[in-house]
Image: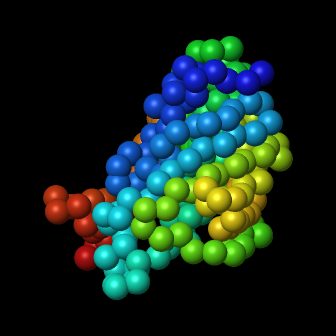
């Protein structure tokens, strides 16, 4: 079943990442087997100032994150919504990135470029999704590709993790090691 524009917009709103760490602007295609989304890297993105001064290039980890937000997070939310017959699950899942394999970079993305991310489902079972992703420029030239996976974790369980073994945050937002 192909998702209509209203449902694609609903899924996009459910993606939890926000500016300045949101790298999906629109979902162009979405069904039970694949997703296609786009993002334009603005020239004022925070990472360009240091990567690299005078020669801005989008970091590879950001390209992987861009593929993950479309291929794992948005796609997983859609498939989970279908499973729940249209209602958001009670658990209100947070999708955690679990795998990046066979990632290859074949080009660079510069400020102002529009990228297209296509994801094809490898599997979706339980609370896990695995997707083959390809990122291309608007002219069709491939930038990177790889197989990515994620796992839906209930928001309650995710927020409980900070109580087990993570260093607490101090008032300035930095980590404070216990006993120091």
Identify the image quadrant of the N terminus.
top right
Q: Which residue lies furthest to the front in this view?
A: 139
Is 96 left, or right, of 33 in this rendering? left
Tell me if I can see residue 156 in this picture. Answer: yes
Q: Which residue is drawn at 79% across and 43% down?
A: 121
Q: Residue at x 37, y 70 (%)?
A: 47
Give residue 130's position: percent from left, percent from top.
Answer: 75, 49
Q: Residue at x 67, y 74 (%)?
A: 105
Q: Residue furthest left?
A: 171
Identify the image quadrant of the C terminus.
bottom left
User: Relative to residue 90, is residue 177 depicted above or below?
Assistant: below
Label total for image? 0
Is 70 left, or right, of 128 in this rendering? left
Quick one: 72 or 141, which is closer to the camera? 141
Give residue 75's position: percent from left, percent from top.
Answer: 66, 38
Tell me if I can see residue 164 in this picture. Answer: no
Q: Which residue is drawn at 47% across and 76% down?
A: 57
Residue 129 lies in quadrant: top right
User: Relative to residue 19, is residue 35 depicted above or below?
Assistant: above
Q: Residue furthest right?
A: 122
Is 133 left, or right, of 96 in this rendering? right
Give residue 167's position: percent from left, percent from top.
Answer: 36, 63
Q: How is the image coloured?
A: rainbow
Give residue 169's position: percent from left, percent from top.
Answer: 27, 59
Residue 63 lies in quadrant: bottom right
Quick one: 138 or 73, which is closer to the camera? 138
Quick one: 177 or 86, which is closer to the camera? 86
Quick one: 141 or 90, which is closer to the camera? 141
């Amino acid at each position: 079943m192909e998702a209509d524009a209203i449902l694609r917009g609903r899924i996009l709103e459910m993606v939890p990442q926000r500016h300045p760490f949101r790298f999906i602007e629109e979902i162009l295609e979405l069904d039970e087997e694949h997703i296609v989304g786009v993002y334009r890297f603005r020239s004022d993105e925070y990472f360009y100032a240091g990567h690299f001064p005078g020669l801005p290039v989008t970091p590879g980890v950001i390209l992987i994150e861009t593929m993950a937000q479309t291929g794992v997070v948005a796609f997983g939310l859609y498939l989970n919504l279908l499973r729940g017959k249209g209602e958001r699950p009670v658990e209100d899942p947070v999708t955690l990135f679990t795998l990046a394999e066979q990632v290859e970079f074949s080009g660079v993305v510069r400020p102002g470029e529009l990228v297209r991310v296509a994801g094809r489902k490898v599997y979706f079972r339980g609370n896990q999704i695995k997707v083959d992703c390809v990122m291309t420029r608007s002219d069709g030239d491939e930038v990177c590709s790889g197989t990515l996976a994620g796992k839906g974790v209930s928001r309650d369980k995710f927020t409980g993790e900070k109580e087990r073994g993570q260093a607490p945050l101090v008032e300035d937002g930095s980590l404070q090691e216990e006993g120091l």
